[in-house]
Amino acid sequence: MEKHTIDRQETSFFSDIANTLVYKQDELKEFIHQPFDIKAFAQQIKDKDANYNHSYRKVLRDSLIKQYANVNTPDAVVQNTLLLEKKDTFTVTTGHQLNLYTGPLYFIYKIVHVIQLAKTLKKEYPSYNFVPVYWMASEDHDFAEINHLNLFNQKRTWESEQTGAVGKFNLQGFEALKHEVKSLFENQPEIAHLVEESYAEEDNLAQATLKLVNQLFGEEGLVIIDADAPELKALYRPVLFKEIGEQFSEKEVQKSTDKLIEKGFHGQVHPREINLFFMENGKRERIIKTEEGNFTAGDDVSFSAIEMLELIDGKPELISPNVVLRPVYQEWILPNLVYVGGGGEMAYWLQLKGVFDALDLQYPLIQVRNSVQIVDGVSQKKMAKLGYEFADFLNSTDALKKDFVLNNSDEEINFEDLNKAFDVLEKTVERDVLSVDKALENYGKGELTKMRKQIENMQSKLIRHQKKKYDDTLKNIDSVHDRLFPGGGLQERKENVLAYFSKYGIDNFLNLLKEHMDPLENDLIILSEN
């Protein structure tokens, strides 16, 4: 593979706030602890060490040992799990939903990024240990977001009537999708085995995801955390009590959101009065405070104020943080230094600094993950034949087609002289005709507009006529664009990694990413087949 990079700002795939987070984080100082930089970790380590409750380390270690009890755990994961008990060990974290077979490619890119960042930090700060972590969003309840994967240009879906936290979903009924996916790799036993073994019927979705991701990245020491665990929720009780008692997070998020709006950005998340859910019996319902000071969760669950406090004290695992308080939960229980995510995801972290401050909790460094675009050999040959490079395809296909026709027509198509001549005519009519009789001004301008439109229509018809001559070539432009940008976006947001395992091999593809992804690279990474 040949690697080069393109400034994200030269593309239309990344938002303004995401680009600011990547290239100009210092402009967002009031919303973060300090801008991301490899040198900034020296201070971040000191701050986290002073702020973190190190007694949580043993609870974290023991919880992880329990979660991995029925998983074939590589030595690297065992060692990193044990290292978490030591005060000189810190985590480098990313998180994601429980997408089937990892879902879109950026799931994989996130994890490779934190693995490589942990290695980079170890070289820069050899006296400390850095553990890469994947935090599973097992408590999320939006099943429609994760119940499918796009593989070989086809959406493949798992239908289930289950509700509540998706991590608890059993895998009954998953067999049909598994068989469908596995049948695509009949001649590739390594991939077929991965597809089959990752989702055993006795597992729930959280366990299946842990097994799959562990198979792919366990040898790199990636530690996978399912925080939907009683012993971890128990550590989080102080925050739960504060949210129920004071409803503090909404106010703090709103303050930051108002400041972001003043700077020309907008909020990614919309806080509630209480940013917690109640989970029980396959349901995950918002907790709402009534005018009488009681609490409800759905139509048939209610608590008095005392009962709610008793619930948090006795069964904190039944309380689930929403998007506002989930990052707080993560940073509360982990000795974490940095969180890595996508542009939109990292944007909402900018709304949370006040929540961290209200809890006297250390805010992590934040970083937008690497984005990678793979250019296959077929596309490269077609681009070369067309006389274009990858960067040209960052423009719209209509613009590319027009450019091609104008540059390759047998009869030179140049409207510059015609447009200039009409500009002169228009000015002459306005000066020498319409100025003589003002009553004709509106009529005359209307006629000029009609003439301008007729000329534009003539130009368009001429271009369309020329396009017909190059029909095959223009279809190739569409073909290349669709291969590079499925659905009009980057591959990473659409395609599934199994297709790339099929083409390159599992280990080869993952090693390819580890070789070329760079956690300190800001630009879009382009990998072109030789």
Image: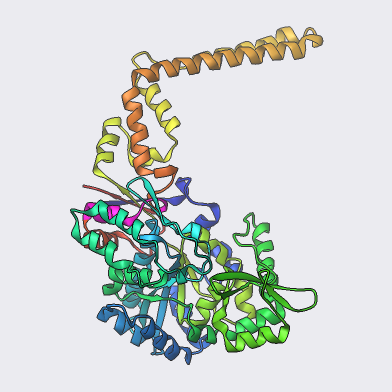
Give the percent coordinates (x, y) of residue 48.
49, 83
Q: Is residue 453 above or below residue 153?
A: above
Seen from the viewer's position, the closer of residues 474 and 183 is: 183
Residue 93 within the magenta-colored segment of the rendering: no
393 to the left or right of 237: left
Q: Is residue 326 above or below residue 269?
A: below
- Residue drawn at (70%, 14%), measured in percent from left and top? 446
| Helix, strand or loop for the magenta stretch, by majority | helix
Q: Is residue 199 above or below residue 304?
A: above
Q: Is residue 290 visible?
A: yes
Give the percent coordinates (x, y) of residue 223.
36, 76
Per the rendered image, the range of residues in magenta is 493-504
- Residue drawn at (26%, 78%), measured in percent from left and top? 74
- Residue drawn at (44%, 71%), measured in percent from left and top? 136
Seen from the viewer's position, the closer of residues 451 and 7 is: 451
Give the percent coordinates (x, y) of residue 63.
42, 85
259 to the left or right of 27: right
- Residue drawn at (61%, 12%), measured in percent from left and top? 451
Seen from the viewer's position, the closer of residues 216 and 42 is: 216
